[in-house]
Amino acid sequence: MFRPSIKKMEPYTPGEQPGARERLIKLNTNENPYPPSPKVPRAITAAANEALRLYPAPRADMFVERASKLYGVPREMILAGNGSDELLSMIFRATLDRGDSVAYPTPTYSLYDTLAAIQEAKVLRFPFGPDFVVPLAALGRARARLTIICNPNSPSGSMTPVRALGGLARALRGRLLVIDEAYVDFADENALRLLKSHRNVVILRTLSKAFSLAGMRLGLAFAHREVIEELLKVKDSYNLSRIALAVGAAALSDPAWMRRNVERVKRTRAMVEKRLRKMGFEVPPSQANFVLARMPGHDLSGIARGLRRARVLVRYFSLPSLRDAIRISIGTPAEMAVLMRALEPLARSELAATRRSA
């Protein structure tokens, strides 16, 4: 009943979602710990009316108009999606036939692997260099049909300078370069300026992280008009509900609220990085709303389980390149204090066990 490639592929595995009655501190899926703009609930109330019997705007006009004003990008260069995940799915469907190549540095967002498997594409994986430096020259030489850079990267939080991404776009001229900026509001720069000089660049954004709207599923793609027109051919007719569109427009009309929350997260992030290093973890400087805590030579699955017993969720990846790491989303200061109290004895025990075995 199903294609052989679907039968044999591994599905994408999201982070654990607690049950309705479980009281856990959730630091495993990079959600914003602070609420969205007060304009959001008002927009939901206003949109929940008799007009819900009508289809929403196919091109998400109101939402796209707000995005155009906020980011200074013409409306015809913007496409709205059901989260940036849907936009990624559209890009994979529009660009890759069976056997076509897609390239990205690893480890990175694991959904890329899933989308490539659905298309039966050939994946060219380029391991990050030391300190999560992107192998830009190798990616440029590969000239895959589709190249993706998650920037800041997940799960490392590391950032590739935009100027360097411009050089990669030039090397890939005639091939699509997707810059996945899901976490860029927590970073020091973004790649939107590359659209002026590179017609092969697509930039993805989400409202899940900085705008505190993970539950609403809102994303944006920025690209030249001819790229947007091709992506429209594989878009669902009405991919965003009327309520979602109203919420997206409301959130984008209040960027000051988002920026205040982002600054709170960044202050907490700096404190968390410092505390983790004191415990003996290696922590790459993060430009996202999470940090990656590593103990080279250790399998941190036991620490992740210990934190779960302490009712704190973090993300552990069983990939060989990440078994020595846990990814920790930045919560409120109070939530991070609970994490630190639970984590400190676990880290001390892990390091002591290594000393004993040595």
Image: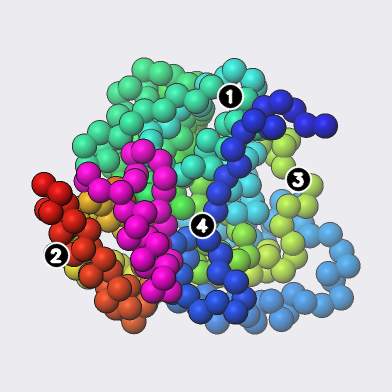
Q: Give the SS element for disc 3.
A: loop
Do residues under tags 1 and 4 come within 8 Å of each other at their CB atoms? no
Camera-nearest residue between 333 and 229: 333
Q: Residues within 10 Å of mark 3 (few under 14, many from 20)?
A: few
Inter-mark Cα distance, 3 to 4: 26 Å
Query: How far apart, in angstroms, are the residues tagged by discs 1 and 4?
Result: 25 Å
- For the N terminus, the image quarter is top right
Counting residues from the N terminus, which is met first, the one under dot 3 or under dot 4?
A: 4
Secondary structure under badge 1? loop
Task: Work out whether mark 1 precedes mark 2 in sequence or the reverse, and give the earlier one.
Answer: 1
Q: Are marks 4 and 2 in contact (CB under 8 Å)?
A: no
Alpha carbon distance from label 4 to label 2: 27 Å
Task: Tell me the tag on residue 278.
Answer: 2
Residue 42 visible within the image: yes
Q: Nearer the viewer, mark 2 or mark 3?
A: 2
Write down the residue under mark 1: 121
Label 4 belongs to which residue?
15
- Magenta segment: does it hold 228? no
Which residue is disc 3 drawn over?
Answer: 236
